[in-house]
Amino acid sequence: MDRMKILLVDDEHEFVTTLGERLELRNMNVSIAMDGESALGFIENDPPQVVVLDLMMPGLSGLKVLEKIKAMDPKIQVILLTGHGATKDGIRGMQLGAFDYLIKPIDIDELIIKLNEAAKKMG
Amino acid sequence: MNLKKWFNIRESLQMLTDADSSSDRYRLFQRNIRVLMIVLTIVPLSMMALINYHQYQSSLKKEMIDPTKLLVSKTRHSFEFFLKERQSLIKSISYFYSLNDLCDEQKLNHILFILKKEFIGFVDLGLINGSDGTQMCYVGPYNLLGKNYANQDWFQEVMLKGTYISDVFMGYRKFPHIAIAVQRLEENGESWILRTTIDTTMFDNLIAAMGLDAESDAFILNKEGIFQTNSRLYGEVLEKFPIKIPSGGHATYVVEKPDPSGNDVFLAYTHLTYPEYTLVIVKPKSTVLKTWYALKSDLFLVFMVSSILIVIVVFRLTGVMVNRIKEADHNREVAFRELQHHHKLSSIGRLAAGVAHEINNPLAIINEKAGLIKDLIEYTPDFAQKEKFSTLVVAVLQSVNRCKTITHRLLGFAKRMEVEIENLDLNELLLEVLGFLEKEALYRNVDIRLELAEDLPRIDSDRGQLQQVFLNILNNAMAAVKDEGRIAITTWEKDANTIAASIRDNGCGMSEATCHKIFEPFFTTKKEQGTGLGLSITYGIVKKLGGDIDVESKENEGTAFKIFLPKKSIV
């Protein structure tokens, strides 16, 4: 089976690199973007299967990025991550076609399950 | 000085609004209001009563006295008429007949006979010589022929004035009589006198005709105050009337005097023009003013009853009023406190959300770093103290998890501040809420029974608000049950549009009256501890969410709340 191709988007460097490393350890192909623009550029060049997207970022917000990803390729699955409990954003994200949303801090096993489900949906 | 302060309503109202919450100020306020209201009502009432009293007294007195006066003057006229008539009659006879005719005893007897027949009271008839005063001719029961009257007063008077009417004297057969004499002057200068005696039965008849009541008395007095007729109460004919009657004037007078036996009496009297008699009516004051006394006692009764009523009403009214004010003050305080509390809660909520968010990010980093360490330990073959490292990192991850629970709960708390409709499972929500009470239930050994419908449909509603609703009701149930009590929570699908939950406890229950009031704001049975807002807020939320709430309770048996919620949100 091909390694799952994942893009992590988060402005928190320490968080995103460590999470990336952990997912690599679990035999996943992980790329990292620190903001919305670079994430979109990355997706254009090399579309991943699943994007794990932080909602609160400087510059382009998570929801905007989500919209653009879906516009580029609706098959790419997006799992939203948030440190804030605002359910409104979560619901809005789901309406925009996000696969699911999780509140930080996340349990790695839970994330893996969601990623697998998302990848399966991506096909 | 102090009195002014005592009655100063404005000041006492001011006192009421002061922060000082001693119950004294209500008592003081109540007292001042009462005194003021009673003074304001009783004083005009008393004044009215007093004015009425005097008005009635004077008008009633008049009304009682005027008829008596009228009666007196009427009777006086009857007397005058009676005497005048007799006098004229004698005078007429003296003119109709010549001296020679009258000197004839047979003729004189005939005249007396006719007089006796046609008029009442004539006793005798005599002719007296004007120059020497000797009885020239006489018919009647006495033998007076030849008697000389020249030295008697009446003879002098009749010679002077032409007529004379005597006072009453005891005459023939010991009956009271009066004498009437007239002088006749012949053209030749000779004069003679015709004199008659009349018994006074007619006086009694005239007095009887007045128709007086049993307590009253009427009689005739001469100018010396000697009874000319019998008095029922004060003596016989020719005795002296004990009360001095003022002389002079011919109008009718009324005076109030005490009689010899000490009773207050009204004397109505008038002086006859001629002879100098006085007609007197005596009426005891109590009879005259009987209606007045009755009215007076009525007046007094009405006054007393209305005064008592006023006092009762004022007391009750001010009691109710002051209690209302007290209640309103209390409610205002509670509402103010509640508002402050709410403000505090919402700022805490915002703060909590902010803090939770800020902590979540570094927490996420710790989580990932520790997670990576754990991963590395697991993926690395055995090394020294691997086990120890593994235990340590797991402990770190566990602590992170605990922090996560806290921050998530804080976020949830903040979320409750705003209305957010989401699709939720009521069973799940109930279990969440129960999580808050588990500890207490455990300590107190309260048996919480769940009968949750397995296929309960999800509904669109506000999680936070519903949490508050169920937390409130469950808190109340926990407060109601004793240790080792029972609380049963049931959910079911009521109909196509509604699901329902019931929370039933076997606690102390409520009376029917309490049951009716529990959803009212500020109603509380917890006295100082409760705000009386919990269930009213609960009610408000359920209604806002388009649902309904229902309560059944029996004292000492328990209470059941039923909450009905629509499946589709109406918000």
Image (cartoon, coloured by chain):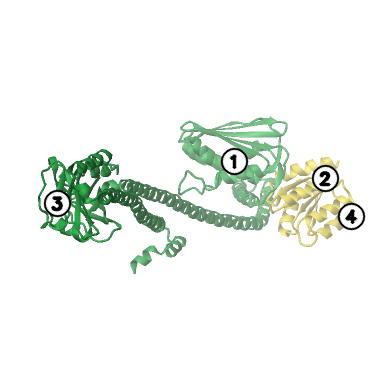
Query: In screen coordinates, is B212 left or right of B399?
Result: left
- For chain A, the rendered hue is yellow
Q: Could you tell me which residue is drawn at 48 percent across and 38 percent down?
A: B480
- Chain that bears disc 2: A
Looking at the rendered structure, whether the residues under marks 3 and 1 are on a common chain is answered as yes
Amino acid beneath label 2: Arg
Circle 4 — which element?
helix
Which residue was labeled with disc 3? B240
Image quadrant occupied by the C terminus of chain B: top right
Image quadrant occupied by the N terminus of chain B: bottom left
Which residue was labeled with disc 2? A3
Nearer the observer: mark 2 or 3; the answer is 3
Which residue was labeled with disc 4? A44
- Chain that bears disc 3: B
Circles 3 and 1, Cβ within 8 Å, touching? The answer is no
Q: CA distance from mark 3 to mark 4?
A: 151 Å
Looking at the rendered structure, whether the residues under marks 3 and 4 are on a common chain is answered as no
Nearer the observer: mark 2 or 4; the answer is 4
Looking at the rendered structure, whether the residues under marks 2 and 3 are on a common chain is answered as no
Amino acid beneath label 4: Glu
Which residue was labeled with disc 1? B470
Amino acid beneath label 1: Phe
The reply to whether residue B236 is in sight is no
* Rendered location of residue B6, percent (x, y): 37, 63
Circle 3 — which element?
loop
Q: CA distance from mark 3 to mark 1?
A: 108 Å
Circles 1 and 2, Cβ within 8 Å, touching? The answer is no
* Rendered location of residue B444, percent (x, y): 47, 37
Of mark 3 and mark 1, the one earlier in the sequence is 3
Query: In screen coordinates, is A65 left or right of B330?
Result: right
